[in-house]
Amino acid sequence: MSQQSTLKKYASLYYAFFRASLQADLEYRANFTLRIVTDVFWYAAQIFTFEVLYRHTKFIGHWNLDQTRVFLGILFVVDAIYMILLHDNLERFSDKVRKGDLDLLLVKPVRSQFMISFQRVGTANFANLIMAVAWLWWSLSRLPDFNLIKLLWLLIVIPNGFMFLYAFRFCFACTAVIFTRSENLQFIWYNIYKLGTRPDSIYAPWMKYILMTVVPVALIASVPARVIIDEPSWPLMIWSFLLGPTMIYGTTLFWKFCLKHYSSASS
Amino acid sequence: MLYANFWRRNLGFAKLAIASNIEYRLNFLVDALVQPCLSSVVEVVLWISIFAGAGMTLIGGFPVESYISYALWATFMGRISSSWMYEFRMIEEIDSGSINSLIVRPMSFYEYYLSQLMGYKFITTAVSLVVPLVLFQIFNLPFHLDRLPICLILVFYYLILVHSLSFIVASLAFYLNRAHSFTAAKNLGLWLLSGELFPLDLLPEPFKTLFSYLPFSSGVYVPTAYITGRIGQEAVIQGFISVTGGLIVANLIGWALWKQAMKNYSGTGA
């Protein structure tokens, strides 16, 4: 099968996933609305924290409140994309392993990693994406030296940030194949992710180095925000662009490794 | 005799929760030890970084040590005072119809899960408590050890309120086909109001007073601020009073929802 027809096949498959998810989500309207509200609470918590802290200081790191708002905007956009594309799939992955649903996915004639990662689309979170973009736009408009051309960078750096988020989250979810019950391991991920939900400018240099290299959660939102707020740092950009695809490739290797340890739950 | 049976039965439920949670040991150790350690490190790093980044020695009138103490205890209290797992199970029992086998037994659905929640929180607290205590000894941070028992009593009392809210959410599963999102929305709301994110005394008025008087501050802010010396005993007494008020309101709502649901419920499909 040519590469083009493979892409076409996956695109049509994803469209089918999207339609099925939308129908399923709209069936439960209260649930649909509450999912939007839940994320609004999360956004409010992040905004609230910084708004309160900035009442007591003018700068955190070398960023002022307006710059931190831009950082939050980028974080919300990446998070909303994550919620739409991945959250439902990876959050329920442990259950799929335990109940034997993974077996059904493994026998389908498509890449199992694709099925696991994208089978369910969080259609309710499109509303959150709109809110996140609106917040980002508003926060950018408050920057005195904002240049519209810099926005083009976002088209590259936000998907790149998303790649890190996917790679990390997928690897943590995959541990369910090895340990069968790994819900609490997922909370470790949330703690690590929490470090990425703060601007890297607040961290000490050694910590920043760790968050850029060893556990590169700073690349999710901090690096994209720096591109907009400060001048783009080329070494950092090159590192970021090399690491993203490498980590995605790493997920495929890790998935294969996990499958070697898989003993079917339903048989 | 009636009370003896009641306590024996509920002790049994609590033991059941302890046994089922330590069944998967790695999962339990991650839950009770690794997670609190990691959360504590993350919170401490964040506050140190905020102080270093801001270039200030005091924020809201308190030094960095006070915030590190607050962050460590808030992480611990926040973990005890939240409830996800049992709320999801309650909803699933109702969704799947397996509740039928529970409501025919000589016990209430409320107490069955409350005792399990308490058993689970008891064993988790006993193990997790090591983390803040060791860290406080190592770093010699300011806190009042003698205040710990009353703080734990308040948090466990607050946990009854949290369970009552879970009971309300679970009862909604009788009326709605899917109630899981209520859990996430409710827990995020509590997270925001409890003071786990930052000390509530940093808030401007009137939010500071309002949030402090709500029962939700008794889950994290009141016990943490009391143990770290930010507030006095009167706030703890106020915490007990507001949780009691919250319990009355939450249980009235829960009771009404449950009663109405039971009237209309036909237990098929289990």
Image (spheres, rainbow, N blue to C red):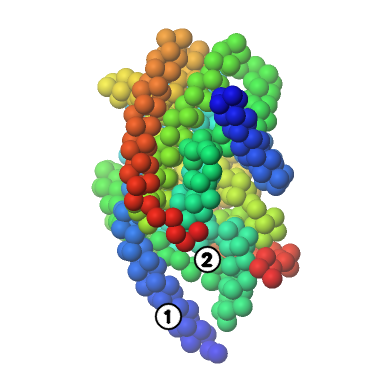
The crowd level at tag 1 (other Cα within 10 Å; few <14, some 14-19, many 20+) is few
Name the foreground residue: A27 vs A61.
A27
Q: Residue at x 38, y 32 (%)?
A: B251
Q: Name the element at disc 1.
A: helix
As drawn, the residue found furthest toward the bottom would be A1
Identify whether B68 is placed above or below A230.
Answer: above
Q: Which residue is mark 1?
A: A12
Chain at numbered mark 1: A
Front-most of A215 and B160?
B160
Q: Tell me where residue B222 appears, x and y as whole percent.
A: 45, 20
Q: Is residue A203 left or right of residue A51?
A: right
Q: Position of residue B104 (x, y in %)?
A: 51, 46
Q: Residue at x 36, y 26 (%)?
A: B248
Q: The disc labelled 1 sits on which kind of residue?
A: Ser
Chain bearing tag 2 is: A
Task: Look at the numbered discs 1 and 2 and tell me whether their residues touch, using CB distance below 8 Å.
Answer: no
- Residue drawn 49% across and 38% down? B108
* B102 to the left or right of B216: right
Give x and y (percent) for residue B14.
Answer: 62, 34
* Residue that mark 2 sits on: A117
Q: Earlier in the sequence, mark 1 or mark 2?
A: 1
Q: In the displayed structure, would residue A37 be above or below residue A17?
A: above
Answer whether residue A2 is visible to the viewer in this image: yes
Quadrant of residue B209 in the image? top left
At label 2, the amino acid type is Ser
Q: Which element type, helix, strand or loop, lies under badge 2?
A: helix
